[in-house]
Structure formats: structure tokens, C-alpha cells
Image (tube, rainbow, N blue to C red):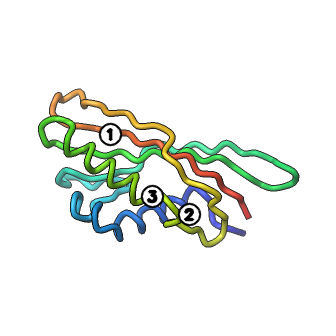
Amino acid sequence: MSEDAAHELQVAIVTCLKADADVTALIAGRVYDRVPQGVSLPYVSFGPTQELPEDADGLDLSDLFIQLSVWSDDPGFAEGRRIAKAVVAALSGDTLSLNDNALVYLELDSRRDLRDPDGLTTHIALTFRAGIENH
């Protein structure tokens, strides 16, 4: 039985972001599925994931939407936007591969720049869309 595509993609994203020099310079490898208590900002965390199955000519395909959240307590949006730009650049191109499933494409679907209710924390929500051929 092959690996769950969402999990496999998440592992590939973490590996890619931690290996990218520009992202590492900004967040020092702080990429989390579950954010540890007391961790310092800035960091990137995983948000919701949605999978939309698709059957095309007998192929087991799916569109996978995965949110990455950039968190910063630097005044204003500048730091969060720099990190978001570096994350998008790191995940662009053919930098990711999956072991059990096939990644057809990964693209930025949307970006939302938010101020957290505390009035201090910046939250940049990046939603990526991945085309997956499930094996």
C-alpha cells in the first residue's frame, strides 16, 4: 500500500523548506506541523489540507490543497511577506518529488495577509494546489 499523498507531500515540503538557504536565513529551519509551545517567531506551520479526488480515464488523480502559514511578530507585514516570498520561490519549479505517488504540479493558489486578533502577530496564509497521481 502506498503512502498517503497529503502526508508524503507535507514531508517533501518540510525537507525542501529546511534545505532552502533563503528560507533558512529567515526562519532558521522552524517549519512545524504542530507548533511547539514557547517557540520563537517567525516560523512556518501547516494549516488545513483538502483533497478533491478525480477519476480521469481510469487514473487515480486528486487535487490537493495545502495551506502553509507564515507567522511573524515583527511590526508590519514586511517580514511575513519576505518569508512568504521565499517559501513560494523554494516550492516553485521541480524541486519536490514523492516516493510512492507522482506530483504532477505544485502552484500557489492564493495568499492572504492577515493581522492576528492580538494586533501584533502577522499571519500570511499561503494555499498551494498540487496535482497528484495516486499509486
Which residue is more in the foreground, 132 or 8?
132
State which quarter of the image contains the N terminus: bottom right
Residue 28: give x, y in percent of width and height: 22, 64
Relative vertical location of residue 20 with respect to residue 62 in this rendering, above or below: below
Nearer the observer: mark 1 or 3; the answer is 3
Kindly identify the amino acid type of the residue bearing the numbered disc 2.
Glu
Q: Earlier in the sequence, mark 1 or mark 2?
A: 2
Kindly indicate whether the residue at mark 2 contacts the one at mark 3 (C-beta within 8 angstroms): no
Tag 1 and tag 2, C-beta contact below 8 Å? no
Residue underneath mark 3: 91
Q: Position of residue 36 (x, y in %)?
A: 27, 55
Determine the residue located farthest toward the right in the rendered image: 57
Q: Which residue is mark 1?
A: 124
Label 3: how many residues lie within 10 Å, few (<14), some (14-19) or many (20+)?
some
Which of 11/127 is in front? 127
Q: Residue at x 36, y 45 (%)?
A: 69
Q: Is residue 76 above or below residue 38?
A: above
In the image, residue 127 sits, relative to residue 16, either above or below, namely above
Please state which of the two labelled residues, at mark 1 or mark 2, is closer to the viewer: 1
| Residue at the disc numbered 2 | 8
- Amino acid bearing label 3: Leu
Question: Along the line of sight, which residue is nearer the eye, 117 or 131?
Answer: 131
Estimate the x, y position of residue 126 in percent, counting from the top left: 41, 42
Mark toward the start of the polypeptide (3 vs 2) = 2
